[in-house]
Image (cartoon, helix red, strand yellow):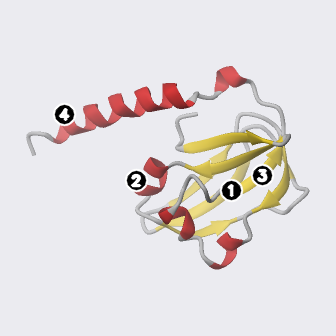
């Protein structure tokens, strides 16, 4: 997944959040629409919508899920994602995903290092 979302399997559930780069590129998250606990979301459908200063974005995942928990802190202060994106998960879900459809941390690191290098190159002469 190259949409700046991280997944972390934990105790039979999957935590889902936004990467540091994702929240940084978004210029800070100011509002998050969280799904209902117990809601089933089909592969590719919107799981979470979030609003930034720049735009409204969506998170979807490449597998069917059922929402088991939402990070209640985000209702009152979605800004916690901006300050701690890896410890502040957005939702917990149950579902099975094909590991070949998601990047491992090592792959993502290499991908983003190359992406950032390309962007630096692109803007170097400006």
Q: Position of residue 23 (x, y in %)?
A: 47, 56
Q: How far apart are marks 1 and 2 (CA)?
A: 17 Å
Q: Distance between the residues labelled 4 and 1?
A: 33 Å
Q: Is residue 78 left or right of residue 36?
A: left
Disc 1 versus disc 3: nearer the observer: 3
Residues at marks 1 and 3 touching, judged by CB atoms closer than 8 Å:
no
For image coordinates 77% across by 62% down, the residue present is: 70
**Which residue is tagged 2?**
25
Circle 1: element type: strand
Crowding near pointer 1: few (<14 within 10 Å), some, many (20+)? some
Q: Mark 1 or mark 2: which comes first in sequence?
A: 2
Q: Distance between the residues labelled 3 and 4?
A: 38 Å
**Which residue is tagged 4?**
121
**Which residue is tagged 1?**
48
For image coordinates 66% across by 25% down, the residue present is: 101
Q: Mark 4 or mark 2: which comes first in sequence?
A: 2
Q: Where is residue 47 in the image (x, y as percent from the top left)?
A: 72, 51
Disc 3 versus disc 2: nearer the observer: 3
| Residue nearest the observer in this picture, 86 or 24 | 86
**Which residue is tagged 3?**
92
Q: Mark 3 or mark 2: which comes first in sequence?
A: 2
Circle 4: element type: helix
Q: Mark 4 or mark 1: which comes first in sequence?
A: 1
């Amino acid at each position: 997944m190259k949409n700046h979302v991280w997944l972390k399997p934990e105790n039979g559930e999957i935590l889902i959040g936004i990467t540091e780069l994702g929240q940084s590129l978004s210029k800070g998250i100011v509002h998050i629409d969280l799904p209902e606990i117990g809601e089933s979301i089909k592969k590719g459908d919107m799981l979470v919508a979030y609003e930034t200063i720049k735009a409204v974005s969506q998170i979807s995942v490449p597998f069917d899920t059922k929402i088991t928990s939402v990070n209640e802190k985000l209702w009152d202060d979605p800004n916690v994602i901006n300050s701690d994106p890896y410890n502040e998960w957005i939702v917990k879900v149950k579902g099975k995903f094909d590991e070949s459809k998601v990047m491992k941390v090592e792959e993502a690191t290499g991908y983003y290092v190359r992406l950032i290098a390309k962007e630096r190159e692109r803007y170097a002469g400006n």
